Image (cartoon, rainbow, N blue to C red):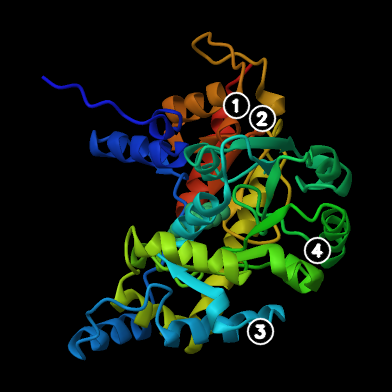
């Protein structure tokens, strides 16, 4: 039999640990185990009916053909209007691209710009996909550990220290997956001051969670805080998280024309364009009544607050309060070194997460997957009943450690 030899760009990367953990939880449930699944990184709500109806109408109207590579004019106008009104970012339609999810847009941005030896600064804890996307594109991820004391945020000094002549990008994810923390305008301006000294560095702003916002300061993008960076920042967003549209696969970005053109060129030779029907739905999501988003954000906020309180009440765990998104990233240092009832020592956050799964059936993701230990991530994109059950089980498991 012929052995299929895979390229290094594939053998050098991993399957996303969050996808793997979610699959493990599903497999255990299918075996009949009583599992509280806190791994899921997508809204538990359904796409609003009004958005679904627009997609159905688009199908009936024959809106079922290839669209322009860079997305329909209607969707790009909706994105342009959203960036201008919500973030104060003025851009033109030819500086906006649309892809099959924010993930694809981020990937293509790296494909378009990263060569072997190029470095991409990724503050940790990070969304699991960033380092592998960089490696898949031949680059070198430069991981910068961000202190919990600084709310896991990249500081100007740490950014300055990480920049080398080989730096191509710095990634800023605000609000962050997995911590939920977001940068304030002042923090972005301080990072911007460093970046102004290093004109070769591009800024990858992943703002996919910026509508799921709880903080009492205003949502800001580095481009609104530091307009001088507009010609080297790619502001990425999408409808997956805010509008419960993960399966529709629409993400987008605004940035310098040369970069947007390059992303479009790659898209023209890979997928041609994202789904016409999903684009019609995404345009409707951005331009339509926003009350369903506001209602879901209220639910996320409430769950987040209550779960945060419950986790902080567990001896040995501590958790920062998120500014947005639907994750909590508790510190489990107090559990490291303890022993389980069947005599196993908890040496890492992975041991702790495995112990939670095996002893009380709580599925979560270990901090090591996000580049900063000892923590674990739980998603609050599930019902309050499930979250209460999960917290009670975590408490029971923690109390059983000696
Ligand atoms: N960025 C972050 C931080 C995410 O957590 C995700 C999804 O989990 C994405 C980007 C990609 O979302 P999508 O490809 O569905 O737009």
Tag nearer the camera, 3 or 2: 3
Residues under labels 3 and 2: Cα distance?
38 Å
State the count of labels: 4
Residues under labels 4 and 3: Cα distance?
19 Å
Q: Give the secondary structure at mark 2.
A: loop
Q: Give the secondary structure at mark 1.
A: helix
Nearer-the-camera pick, 82 or 263: 263
Contact? badges 4 and 3 (CB < 8 Å): no
Which disc number belongs to residue 286?
Answer: none
**Label 3 sits on residue:** 84
**Label 2 sits on residue:** 373
Which disc number belongs to residue 184?
Answer: 4
Query: Which residue shows up at 86% across the image and 63% down it?
Result: 189
Nearer-the-camera pick, 14 or 337: 14
On screen, residue 197 above or below 91: above
Query: Which residue shows up at 81% across the image and 61% down it?
Result: 188
Residue 334 appears left or right of 135:
right
Residues under labels 2 and 1: Cα distance?
7 Å
Contact? badges 2 and 1 (CB < 8 Å): yes
On screen, residue 82 above or below 320: below
> Around disc 2, counting alpha carbons within 10 Å, would you say few (fewer than 14), some (14 to 19), or many (20 or more)?
some
Which disc number belongs to residue 349?
Answer: 1
Q: Give the secondary structure at mark 4.
A: loop
> Residue 263's x, y, as percent?
48, 62
> Could you tell which of marks 4 and 2 lies nearer the N-terminus?
4
């Amino acid at each position: 039999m012929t052995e299929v030899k895979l390229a290094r760009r594939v053998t050098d990367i991993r399957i996303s640990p969050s996808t793997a953990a979610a699959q493990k939880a599903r497999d255990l449930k299918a075996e009949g185990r009583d599992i509280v699944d806190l791994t899921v990184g997508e809204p538990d709500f359904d796409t609003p009916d009004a958005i679904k109806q627009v997609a159905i109408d688009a199908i009936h109207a024959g809106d079922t053909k290839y669209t322009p590579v860079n997305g329909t004019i209607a969707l790009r106008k909706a994105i342009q209007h959203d960036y201008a009104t919500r973030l104060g970012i003025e851009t033109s339609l030819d500086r906006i691209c649309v892809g099959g999810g924010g993930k694809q847009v981020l990937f293509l941005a790296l494909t378009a710009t990263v060569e072997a030896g190029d470095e991409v600064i990724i503050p940790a804890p990070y969304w699991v996909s960033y380092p592998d996307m960089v490696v898949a594109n031949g680059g070198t991820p430069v991981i910068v550990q961000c202190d919990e004391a600084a709310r896991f945020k990249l500081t100007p000094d740490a950014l300055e220290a990480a920049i080398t002549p080989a730096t191509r990008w710095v990634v800023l994810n605000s609000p962050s997956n997995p911590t939920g923390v977001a940068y304030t305008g002042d923090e972005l301006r301080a990072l911007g001051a460093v970046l102004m000294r290093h004109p070769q560095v591009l800024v990858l702003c992943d703002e996919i969670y910026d509508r799921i916002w709880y903080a009492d300061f205003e949502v800001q993008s580095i481009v609104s805080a530091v307009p001088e960076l507009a010609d080297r920042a790619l502001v990425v967003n999408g409808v997956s998280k805010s509008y419960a549209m993960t399966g529709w696969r629409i993400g987008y970005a605004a940035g310098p024309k040369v970069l947007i053109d390059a992303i479009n060129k790659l898209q023209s030779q890979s997928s041609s364009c994202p789904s016409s029907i999903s684009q019609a739905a995404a345009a409707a999501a951005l331009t339509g009544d926003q009350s369903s988003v506001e209602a879901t954000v209220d639910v996320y906020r409430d769950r987040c607050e209550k779960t945060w309180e419950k986790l902080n009440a567990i001896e040995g765990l501590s958790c920062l309060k998120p500014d947005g998104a639907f994750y909590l990233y508790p510190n489990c240092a107090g559990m490291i070194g303890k022993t389980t009832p069947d005599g196993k020592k908890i040496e890492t956050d992975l041991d702790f997460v495995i112990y939670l799964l095996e002893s009380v059936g709580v599925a979560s993701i270990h901090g090591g997957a996000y580049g900063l230990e000892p923590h674990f991530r739980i998603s609050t994109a599930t019902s309050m009943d499930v979250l209460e059950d999960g917290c009670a089980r975590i408490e029971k498991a923690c109390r059983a450690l000696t």
